[in-house]
Image: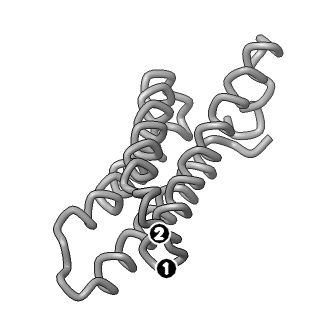
Amino acid sequence: MVHPYIINTINALVLIGAGLIGYFASPDKPVTALAAPAFGVLLLACTHHLRRHNRFVFNTVTALTLLVGFVVVARIDPANFEWDRRHILYLLMGASCFIAAAFYIGTFIQERRLRNNEIYKEDL
């Protein structure tokens, strides 16, 4: 199983990169397009604490990742969905968030089953 701080870093970089591409590719440069990169920076700031196995930060990052995933996917309007750059970036960011949350939950379940913190012994 991949460690949560690695998944968090990848997810944050996807949010930052795709959000900035969406912002600079749009001719009117909406400020709301910078919401995903802002959340990506917040998630990236939590990586150090995830590496130190802080449970509060782990739960907060999981909840924030799910929230960002739902917000990004909610911005897709099914009535006028087209396979253009904007919708593909929304799908990419949403899928990245949901996959990251699935890895977080899977790691949590695996750690609970082992009950001896074996997953993180190589990091300590």
The vertical placement of 3 against 108, above or below, is: below
Decide if residue 94 is on the left or right side of residue 100.
left
Decide if residue 19 is on the left or right side of residue 47.
left
Q: Which numbered circle lies on residue 84?
A: 1
Residue at image coords 62%, 41%: 4
The vertical placement of 52 against 56, above or below, is: below
Q: Residues within 10 Å of mark 2 (few under 14, many from 20)?
A: some
Q: Are marks 1 and 2 in contact (CB under 8 Å)?
A: yes
Residue at image coords 48%, 47%: 47
Amino acid at the residue labelled 1: Asp
- Residue 52: x percent and y percent? 53, 35
- Residue 76: x percent and y percent? 42, 57
Decide if residue 104 is on the left or right side of residue 93.
right
Q: Which residue in the protein does label 2 denote? A: 87
**Farthest residue, direction front:** 79
- The Cα–Cα distance between marks 1 and 2, rounded to whole angstroms, is 6 Å
Amino acid at the residue labelled 2: His
Helix, strand or loop status at disc 2: helix
Can you tell which quarter of the image residue 56 is in? top left
Residue at image coords 49%, 79%: 84
Can you tell which quarter of the image residue 19 is in? bottom left
Classify the position of the N terminus by image quarter: top right
Q: Nearer the viewer, residue 116 or 65?
A: 65
Classify the position of the C terminus by image quarter: top right
- Residue 26: x percent and y percent? 28, 83
